[in-house]
């Protein structure tokens, strides 16, 4: 499959009593489709997958697929630190019609590089669905190295890597080793343009939850060969991208969504609402950026 452009790591909206807000989720997806994104990623880190039950997780994937109805790609979150659970989530995503799955490196367990390889090998050998690997050492406590990624290229279903190590040298080395066998997607909004310059093809974005048209414009400029235009958009996005991590994500993006009139609702414990001073700093960035509230 071809993966290119702006994919959105969508937030999971909750009602005030803590349930998944189906109507809000559907509305948010329509907002993203209307603004030209290439696809969405439900039930990733931004979707608070760690505090969704598996029943809720599968339901969010189902709602996303039903709302999209094939208009854009859906990469369903299927990550776990339990290989068997990842396989079960992957089976569900395939049966429901997702175009691909996103599988984070197992967190907390701190597997070796061989353990990472065997984890992904087991999933790829069991479920025939395109897979996007996800490397985010700051969340998981383990960094998947370029040599391991290169080994995983032997599996035809492993088609892409979301790279959120923040290490552009490592990402460049992955591209050197894997070339066109693996699509590299930025996992860090602020590094999207540098990663594109190192051979990347897309982003799985947090900031695009609130400013999808701007991130889409960055890709349109880059792939049209307008590097000056892409750089200008990158610099326009940068303060907002950085603001999405003033506190633990997805706290800032859900705060921004609520402020702008998108459905987000509260966070689930152990995440809590932003501190008042940090929230004001975030809202100041939003106002300065010119992002318009929905009427």
Image (cartoon, rainbow, N blue to C red):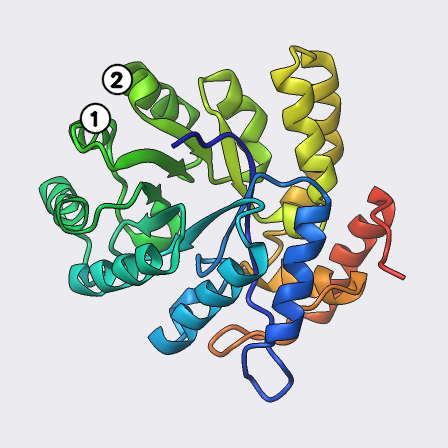
Q: Where is residue 44 in the image (x, y as percent from the top left)?
A: 44, 57
Q: In this view, does 71 lie to the left or right of 136?
A: right
Check the picture and name the quadrant holding the C terminus.
Answer: bottom right
User: Which comes sooner in the sequence, label 1 or label 2?
Assistant: 1
Q: Report which quarter residue 214 is drawn in.
A: top right
User: What residue do we see at 71% from left, 54% from top?
Assistant: 31
Q: Would residue 79 be seen by someone viewing this image from the given angle?
A: no
Q: In this view, does 291 lie above or below 17?
A: above
Residue 150's disc is: 1
Q: Residue at the location (55% across, 67% down)?
A: 12
Disc 1 versus disc 2: distance between alpha carbons? 6 Å
Disc 2 target residue = 177
| Residue at the right extreme of this rendering | 295
Q: Where is residue 265 in the image (x, y as percent from the top left)?
A: 66, 74
Q: Is residue 199 left or right of residue 235?
A: left
Front-most of 103 and 244?
103
Residue at 66% across / 14% down in the picture? 224
Q: Is residue 185 above or below residue 88?
A: above
Which one is nearer the viewer's eye here, 180 or 64? 64
- From the viewer's perspective, tell me whether residue 194 is left or right of residue 102: right
Looking at the rendered structure, the secondary structure element under dot 2 is helix
Q: Which residue extends farthest top? A: 225
Q: Where 203 falls versus 115 (above or below)?
A: above
SS for tag 1? helix
How many neighbours does mark 2 have within 10 angstroms: few (below 14), some (14-19), or many (20 or more)?
some
Dots 1, 2 in contact, CB < 8 A: yes
- Residue found at x 69% / y 64%: 27
């Amino acid at each position: 499959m071809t993966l290119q452009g702006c994919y959105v790591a969508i937030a999971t909206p909750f009602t005030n009593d803590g349930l998944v807000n189906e109507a809000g989720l559907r509305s948010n997806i329509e907002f993203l489709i209307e603004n030209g994104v290439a696809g969405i990623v439900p039930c990733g880190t931004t979707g608070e997958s760690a505090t969704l039950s598996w029943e809720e997780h599968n339901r969010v994937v189902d709602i996303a697929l039903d709302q999209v109805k094939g208009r854009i790609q859906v990469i369903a979150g299927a990550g776990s630190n339990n290989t068997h659970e990842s396989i079960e989530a992957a089976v569900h995503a395939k049966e429901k019609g997702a175009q691909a799955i996103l599988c984070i490196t197992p967190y907390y367990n701190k597997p070796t590089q061989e353990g990472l390889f065997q984890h992904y090998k087991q999933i790829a050998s069991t479920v025939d669905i395109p897979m996007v690997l996800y490397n985010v050492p700051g969340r998981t406590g383990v960094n998947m190295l370029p040599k391991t990624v290169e080994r995983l290229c032997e599996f035809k279903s492993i088609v892409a890597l979301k790279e959120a190590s923040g290490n552009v040298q490592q990402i460049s080395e992955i591209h050197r080793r894997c070339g066109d066998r693996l699509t590299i997607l930025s996992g860090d909004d602020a590094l999207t343009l540098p990663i594109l310059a190192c051979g990347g093809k897309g982003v799985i974005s947090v900031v695009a939850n609130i400013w999808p048209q701007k991130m889409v414009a960055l890709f349109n400029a880059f792939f049209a060969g307008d590097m000056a235009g892409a750089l200008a958009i990158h610099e326009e996005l940068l303060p907002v991208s950085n603001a999405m991590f003033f506190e633990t994500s997805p706290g800032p993006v859900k705060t921004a969504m609520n402020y702008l009139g998108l459905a987000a609702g509260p966070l689930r414990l152990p995440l809590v609402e932003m501190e008042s001073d940090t929230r004001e700093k975030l809202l100041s960035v939003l106002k300065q950026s010119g992002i318009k509230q929905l009427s």
